[in-house]
Image (cartoon, helix red, strand yellow):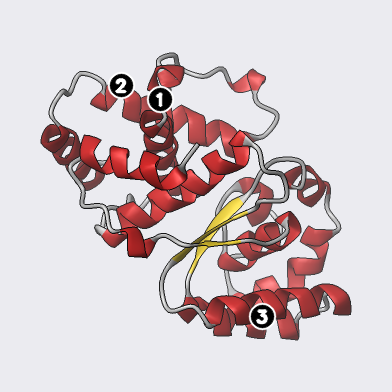
Amino acid sequence: MNVQSKLKLLCKKIALPYKSELYKQLICKRDLIIIDNYVTGCPAQEYSKYKNDTSENRIKNITKFIHSEDFKSELKSPKGAKTNKKDSSWKISIIKKSALDPNLKIRMVKFYNKVSLLDKEYGISIVDKENAKNKEVCLHEFIHILLESNKIRHSSWKWNEGLVTYLTSYALNKEKNHEKNPQKNKFKSNFYYNYVLYAHKWHVSLKELVKPEDRLKNIKIKIAET
Ligand SMILES: [Zn+2]
């Protein structure tokens, strides 16, 4: 799968401009992405139960998170994240002030330093295994960048992740996967269940629309209304 060409195709389907220079990938290990999610303040339960709402709380609780079962189970699935240069310095200061293992501290700071040298918004996805699933993660992160660079962002993380999840499937012609309302008991992680549940809601709202302009209009209206 060529991620950039799938993205280009998606842009046509939802009437957004494709700017190749926005999309770059940085390769890193999965654990660093999970730690970055925690430091960013990811609101999903698996992260937020270790109180990551303020910088002070993150410094205090990050080691609790790292030694948790949630962290271990997060390590089992492909991960991606989107980050940017301007966030690197405050993230480094959180890592430095925390009681993280020195080795991990060095790796995290090195990672953020690398990000801080970049001059654009970058999609970061793991590529420890060159499989189709990872390319899907990369596409997912790129779609976040596409939407944000066009100021399309729902204030609720569930609606936002649902839209990106739906559009990732749409770019791959797999949107029919979201036809049915997902059953909660089939998901090990409540976090991912929300992605799929809200992707289904977006599918319902967009599936009848034929013109790319109408799809874009509908996305914008829904974001303003809900
Ligand atoms: Zn996402």
Three-letter code, disc 3: Ile
Q: Secondary structure at mark 3?
A: helix
Indicate whether 81 appears above or below 88: above
Could you tell me if the residues under marks 2 and 1 are in contact, i.e. CB atoms within 8 Å?
Answer: yes
Task: Tell me residue 84's x, y (percent).
Answer: 47, 72
Dividing the picture into quarters, in which one does residue 30 lie? Answer: bottom right
Residue in the picture at 87% in, 80% down:
102
Indicate whether 61 appears above or below 158: below
Residue in the picture at 38% in, 24% down:
173
Cα distance, mark 2 to mark 3?
A: 41 Å
Q: Which residue is mark 3?
A: 94
Q: Earlier in the sequence, mark 1 or mark 3?
A: 3
Q: Residues within 10 Å of mark 2 (few under 14, many from 20)?
A: some
Q: Out of 116 and 193, give the one closest to the viewer.
A: 116
Cα distance, mark 1 to mark 3?
A: 36 Å
Q: Which residue is mark 1?
A: 200
Left or right of 96? Residue 160 is left
Residue in the picture at 31% in, 52% down:
147
Task: Tell me residue 220's x, y (percent).
Answer: 19, 44
Q: Which residue is mark 2?
A: 204
Cα distance, mark 2 to mark 1?
A: 6 Å
**Residue 219, labelled with which disc?**
none
Q: Residues within 10 Å of mark 1 (few under 14, many from 20)?
A: many
Dividing the picture into quarters, in which one does residue 151 lie? Answer: bottom left
Q: State whether label 1 is within 8 Å of ligand 1.
A: no
Task: Tell me residue 39's x, y (percent).
Answer: 63, 68
